[in-house]
Amino acid sequence: MSARKPYVRSMDGWWRKNPFFMRYMAREASAVFLAIYAVILLAGLLRLSQGPAAYEAWLAALTHPLAIVFHGIALIMVAYHAYTWWKVMPKTMPMLHVGGRRIPEITLSAVGWAAWLAASLIVYALVRGL
Amino acid sequence: MADTEKIIEIEVLRYRPEQDPEPVLQTYQVPFTDDMSVLQGLQYIKDYLDGTVSFRWSCRMAICGSCGMMIDGEPKLSCKTFLREYYPGKLRVEALAHFPIERDLVVGIDDFIGKLESIKPYIIPREPRTLEQGEYLQTPAQRDQYEQFSSCINCLLCYAACPQYGLNPDFTGPAALALAHRYNADTRDKGWEARQEVVNAEAGVWRCMLVGYCSEVCPKGVDPAHAINQNKVNSTLDYFGVLKFLLPKGAAK
Amino acid sequence: MKRANEPIFWSLFGAGGVLSALLGPILILITGIVVPTGTGMPPDAMAYPRVLALAQSWCGKAALLAVISLFLWHAMHRIYHSLHDLGIHAGAGAAAVCYGIALVATLATAYLLLIIGF
């Protein structure tokens, strides 16, 4: 008779065992902060629709130290999302060629990072330029 | 002859189904020189210290894909990993992750074989072709679309790397999907329609979360993450019925 | 094998991912840190009249809807799939909650933008 008894190992704590997986989980966790931020904006829109007093209260709440800390962490997390997004974006595209040579992935990512920087500067200028 | 013989400690995860209720680590003291691979270390153990240790190997030059195992928790080919990198510490050698252990460092790979068969890993001609028509012609750019994916040696390091495969054994997986793409992207092949059922399924490209570790560990530079995610776009275009307008129509000459 | 319906959610995930990868950090910086701490921006950058005018313009409505809605479609897709990574066996119920949040937020945003007027 067969003496085989295949052993299946547990996946418990798989992502804590490798720095690569820790970075992956950090990237995924950025979504939590992005979601909360979007809800904060939605709350602001609600307050805006309720008139100036309600809106001022929302603005005031944003100055609370806990709010500042949240946004500080959210900034780091969502920036990590943006960085990794453009890093992997080339993997969704076919191989591109210019003059018979393959365009390396890092070049495509650099275009994405540059677009991120440009968009950020434009938004800042638009908000600032009263 | 060797005046300064170095000894490295190798921990091997043993599993003998006839006597072990579960795997257990066993330590060996292995003398080595700087040019020795982990595979050679295991061979020393088997030849001189403990003949019962079981492991797969063949070419010892990173082309057959037999010797994949977890070395200090990372999927590697033991013939391509060197003992000197771990000295003076010790190293831990375990069977490839996410596969059932049959014995010691030998895993059951039937699941992968089934998945490989399911993606039809051979050219399905786009149209019938006679000998008189001569050979297919491909431009360098056309070949570049699939060439790197043809380097796969089925070593399964990518499956050991993929946590989605570990969590969901129904996932078709990195190598099988990369090979499906290798054929789909080849202008000689019928392409998408031949393999779309497997690719479009939940267990096809959609299990992938782009962890990306598969591409990190591949010893042949295949980049399965690229093959899979490029096909998420194709699968999406197919879902909305527009892929057929975008696929290259040119018949292979 | 049944064809997956993932492409619908993945498309929304992708759109939200691109938008948040371009605008996410700067919006968080401005609305969450720069303006509340009064540094580097005129004090009335987010004043009521200004923001109301934005929300009443067609461009502003489109931008606000895109940002709030797509950020959430992106985030909830990622959160739903991450539950699995954490060993939580999320089924149809969890999917309904996650995508439900994005859908409710989209509808609420559209409604608010309508009642805010033109």
Image (cartoon, rainbow, N blue to C red):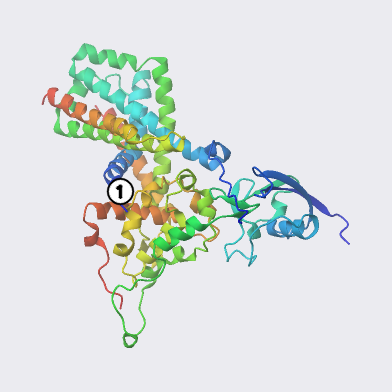
Find disc 1 in the rendering and name its residue: C4
Residue B73 lies, with reference to residue B34, above or below; the image says above
Give the residue displayed 39% in from the left and 62% down from the top.
B119
User: On the picture, is B157 further left or further right than B232?
Assistant: right
Q: Is residue A76 above or below residue B251?
A: above
Residue B125, horizontal then vertical, whole percent: 33, 73
Question: Where residue C12 sits: x, y (%)?
Answer: 28, 41
Residue A17 appearing in the image: yes
Q: How crowded is mark 1: few (under 14 residues within 10 Å), some or many (20 or more)?
A: some
In percent of width and height, residue B46 lies at: 75, 58
- Viewed as shown, does residue B229 lie left or right of A56? right
Residue A12 x/y as whole percent = 54, 36
Tag count in the figure?
A: 1
Between A115 and A105, the one lying in front of the other is: A105
The C terminus of chain C sits in image quarter: top left
Residue at image location 31% in from the left, 41% down from the top: C13
Residue at x-position 81% and y-position 52%: B6
Amino acid found under the numbered disc labelled 1: Ala
Q: What element carries label 1?
A: loop
| Whether residue C46 is visible | no
**Left or right, residue B238 beside residue B36:** left
- For the N terminus of chain C, the image quarter is bottom left
Q: Mark 1 falls within which chain?
A: C
Q: Nearer the viewer, residue A110 or B137?
A: B137
At horizontal 18% and vertical 19% (from top left) the residue drawn is A49
